[in-house]
Amino acid sequence: MIDLYTAATPNGHKVSIVLEELDMPYTVHALSFDQKEQKAPEFLKINPNGRIPAIVDRANGDFAVFESGAILIYLAELSGQLLPNDPKGRSVAIQWLMFQMGGIGPMQGQANVFFRYFPEKLQGAIDRYQHETRRLYEVLDTRLESVEFLADAYSIADIATYPWVRGHEWSGVPVDGLPALQRWMAAMAQRPAVQRGLLVPQRVDDASVIKGAQAMLIR
Ligand SMILES: N[C@@H](CCC(=O)N[C@@H](CS)C(=O)NCC(=O)O)C(=O)O
């Protein structure tokens, strides 16, 4: 059984989507950012960075994993799915996973900060992060012109990327003129496990919607 510590954010959704795709049983611990639960000493023992997502593998000596990309690799390796076995195929999937972790996540995250949350309107910072995110989307679009999914077969690279790209409007980054990216987004949105994963965490009384999850609040 996997314990998932999460919140309704793109990085959290990556992990719930993978768990749903793999049909792995898991328990959801919804952390409240308002209550700063992600900074609580008990949680810092699981993720020293004080952020979500994190997992604890109860079937494997209470092994804790933080950083969403590392969690995705761990779950893929545990199950033998969503990550190719041959060195080249595996490398391609990990390259696109790293592209998300090192590029789209940080850039789009900062676009959100300066476009949505920062008290001052710093147009230079807004432009910088929105333009850089758009540039990264163009790289994805070019890639997806020649392959159905980022690493040819559906993989953790797609699952890492989709929860971010689907939030492009909130980040103020258009996807106009990127037809291959839009085709891929539509395909991702159709997947039942993606749809279920995007509902995590949710209220306990809605838990019947979730297949693998035993929804529960940490408090
Ligand atoms: N690189 C980390 C980023 C984690 C991250 O930034 N999580 C955000 C939510 S998406 C968070 O926990 N924010 C709360 C905080 O910073 O206190 C990962 O991919 O796991």
Image (cartoon, rainbow, N blue to C red):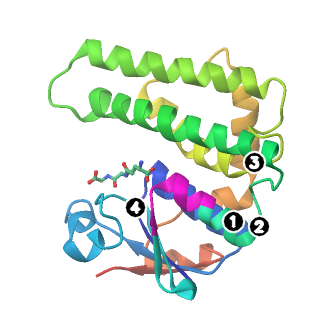
* Mark toward the viewer: 2 or 4: 2
Amino acid type for the residue under numbered disc 4: Ala
Q: CA distance from mark 3 to mark 4?
A: 29 Å
The residue singled out by tag 4 in the image is 7
Label 4: which secondary element: loop
Q: Give the spatial CA distance, label 4 vs label 1.
A: 24 Å
8, 54: nearer the viewer: 54
Could you tell me the amino acid type at mark 2? Gly
- Point 28% across, 82% down: residue: 219
Using the numbered discs, state the Cα–Cα distance from disc 3 to disc 2 in whole angstroms: 12 Å
Question: In the rendering, which numbered label is found on residue 80?
Answer: 2
Quarter-wise, where is residue 51 in the image? bottom left
The image position of residue 184, as x and y in percent, is 74, 36
Q: From the viewer's perspective, is 26 left or right of 123?
A: right
The answer to whether the beta carbon of the residue marked 4 is less than 8 Å from any atom of ligand 1 is yes
Q: Nearer the viewer, mark 3 or mark 4?
A: 3
Left or right of residue 136, residue 22 in this image? right
Q: Earlier in the sequence, mark 2 or mark 4?
A: 4
